[in-house]
């Protein structure tokens, strides 16, 4: 029969377990361990550039700026997380190296023989772990608790494995430290943190700052599309906010904190993921300073919004209300740190080319005078936008503090007719591919000739609305076709040519065994669509009576 357990020993053990467990709960909630680096491989700038090329035509300099900016930003975050993990590992190692001594008379201290042995070990500069089955937790054990290690029940540690040189091998508790690195052996060899790196030991450690980006350019040149495509290529939360609906705090409209709340929802309400996201502020030029007398009325939707955005763009801990709408001082807030959030702003900045023209080509007379340039020409606008500096944006109406937080200024160029033709056909979600898919849902093929594409691009270029004008033209052209085709039998192809685009006649429908190849071959022989069997125009049967009755 086993001897009864001393009630004092049982109470001390119970107290030891309760104290250590509560300490673990307190420290884990107040100071969680540093975040684990992302497991996914960070794409290189060339890979991001190639991905943008699949969806966006042209704008090479903007693609390069976005590729480099996004890659460097998340490379910077990876370095910061690696430094935190290294510091975390060093703290664990230093904690493990601390020697735990017991006071005289401690439970488990044994008799005088054990105390004599411990004293001899202390005099020799070494320490032999006590032979007791349990002891009270020491300060070293409590330090280990904040890193998620449990020290609730202290038992005799396993004997250390001796190596050949007499040193002890690392304990099994240190094994997870090696798993913190998520990079491959190839990446480790290129990493500057590698001690065998060729120039790594020569580089001085420093903190890397983020580089926010501002994109300027004419409307319809692809600024918003570039950012939307960027969200598809990288697995980070990205939110596109419209600056026109923002107002200064205390006035009717959305506060700037609503941008971060949208990012929080976009990240699945994951705070850590939210603090690594990207924010694109569209229509930034609409929050320029008003030219009126500010002493009469405050500029709550212009300069006031710029001042409110300063604290967010710079990088601070922002209190964001959990519920959208009017702020409640007693409501719950979410603290979001914007230090690691990349901000991209964009706008058309109409009239900025005149400011740049005044700075670069000042009026002069004489033989060396510069000729006046047509700033309405998209090529001239592109040249001026490429030479934009912060001073020009300040003259436009932006405040210096806001522009200073966007060190990278890039511009998109106006689209040529050739670029508009490529936009119609080449991207993954081009307009022609969309209409082909849309007609295919009704079992009908769609074919647009090269001449039709050029005429559509020419009309869009003449309207000056950029790529957005392409859909407006094609929708009006194919409206009646999409109205009648789903209810017609024996129609299998819609043929769109230049004459249909110019409005000389309607698009042509193919029936029976007529194909595009046969139709074009007959046209080359001098036939017209009226002479070809199996081809007819789009028409609304009894349209007048039908619509009058409706």
Image (tube, rainbow, N blue to C red):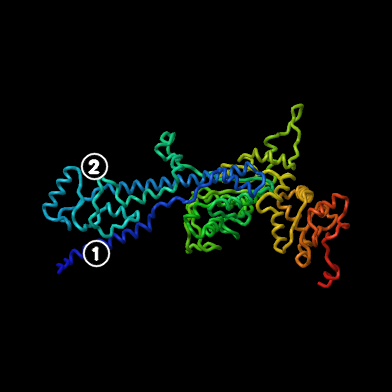
Q: Looking at the image, which residue is at 82% across and 51% down? A: 521
Q: Which residue is mark 2?
A: 166
Residue 153 vertical placement versus 525 (above, below)? below
Residue lying furthest left: 112
Does residue 295 appear left or right of residue 143 in this picture?
Answer: right
Q: Tell me the distance, in whole angstroms, between the alpha carbons under discs 2 and 1.
A: 38 Å
Q: Quadrant of residue 135?
A: bottom left
Residue lying furthest top: 367
Residue 77 vertical placement versus 258 (above, below)? above
Quarter containing the C terminus: bottom right
Does residue 75 appear left or right of residue 522 in this picture?
Answer: left
Mark 2 touches mark 1? (CB < 8 Å): no
Residue 253, image x and y in percent?
Answer: 60, 59
Residue 127, image x and y in percent?
Answer: 20, 47
Front residue of this view, candidates 5 and 211:
5
Q: Looking at the image, which residue is at 32% across and 47% down? A: 93
Does residue 214 appear left or right of residue 219 in this picture?
Answer: left
Q: Looking at the image, which residue is at 82% across and 69% down? A: 547
Q: Which residue is mark 1?
A: 14
């Amino acid at each position: 029969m086993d001897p009864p357990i001393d009630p004092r020993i049982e109470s001390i053990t119970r107290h030891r377990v309760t104290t250590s467990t509560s300490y673990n709960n307190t420290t884990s909630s107040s100071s969680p361990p540093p975040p684990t680096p992302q497991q996914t491989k960070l794409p290189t700038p060339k890979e991001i550039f190639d991905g943008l090329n699949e969806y966006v035509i042209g704008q090479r300099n903007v693609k390069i700026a976005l590729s480099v900016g996004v890659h460097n930003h998340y490379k910077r975050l990876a370095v910061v997380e690696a430094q935190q993990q290294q510091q975390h590992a060093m703290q664990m190692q230093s904690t493990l190296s601390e020697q735990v001594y017991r006071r005289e008379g401690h439970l488990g201290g044994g008799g005088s023989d054990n105390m004599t042995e411990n004293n001899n070990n202390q005099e020799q500069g070494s320490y032999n772990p006590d032979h007791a089955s349990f002891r009270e937790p020491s300060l070293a054990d409590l330090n280990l608790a904040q890193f998620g290690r449990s020290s609730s029940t202290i038992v005799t540690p396993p004997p250390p494995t001796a190596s050949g040189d007499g040193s002890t091998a690392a304990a099994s508790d240190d094994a997870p430290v090696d798993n913190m690195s998520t990079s491959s052996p190839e990446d480790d060899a290129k990493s500057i943190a590698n001690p065998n790196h060729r120039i790594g030991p020569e580089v001085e450690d420093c903190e890397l700052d983020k580089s926010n980006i501002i994109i300027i350019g004419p409307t319809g040149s692809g600024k918003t599309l570039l950012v939307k495509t960027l969200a598809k290529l990288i697995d980070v939360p990205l939110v596109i906010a419209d600056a026109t609906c923002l107002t200064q705090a205390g006035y009717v409209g959305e506060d700037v904190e609503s941008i971060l709340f949208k990012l929080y929802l976009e990240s699945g309400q994951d705070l850590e993921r939210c603090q690594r996201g990207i924010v694109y502020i569209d229509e930034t030029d609409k929050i320029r300073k008003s030219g009126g007398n500010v002493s009469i009325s405050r500029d709550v939707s212009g300069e006031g919004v710029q001042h409110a955005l300063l604290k967010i763009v710079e990088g601070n801990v922002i209190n964001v209300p959990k519920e959208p709408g009017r702020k409640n001082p007693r409501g719950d807030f979410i603290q979001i740190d914007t230090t690691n959030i990349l901000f991209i702003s964009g706008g058309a900045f109409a009239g900025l080319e005149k400011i740049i023209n005044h700075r670069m080509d000042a009026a002069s007379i004489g033989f060396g005078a510069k000729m006046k340039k047509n700033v309405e020409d998209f090529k001239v606008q592109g040249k001026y936008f490429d030479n934009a500096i912060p001073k020009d944006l300040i003259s436009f109406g932006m405040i210096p503090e806001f522009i200073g937080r966007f060190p990278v200024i890039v511009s998109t160029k106006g689209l040529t007719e050739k670029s508009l033709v490529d936009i119609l056909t080449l991207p993954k979600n081009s307009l022609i591919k969309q209409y082909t898919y849309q007609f295919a849902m009704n079992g009908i093929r769609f074919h647009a000739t090269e001449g039709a594409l050029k005429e559509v691009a020419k009309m869009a270029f003449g309207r000056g609305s950029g790529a957005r004008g392409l859909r407006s033209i094609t929708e009006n052209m194919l409206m009646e076709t999409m109205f009648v085709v789903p209810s017609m039998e024996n129609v299998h192809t819609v043929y769109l040519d230049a004459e249909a685009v110019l409005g000389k006649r309607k698009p042509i429908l193919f029936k029976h065994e007529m194909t595009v190849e046969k139709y074009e071959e007959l046209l080359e022989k001098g036939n017209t669509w009226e002479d070809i069997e199996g081809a007819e125009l789009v028409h609304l049967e009894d349209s007048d009576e039908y619509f009058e009755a409706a």
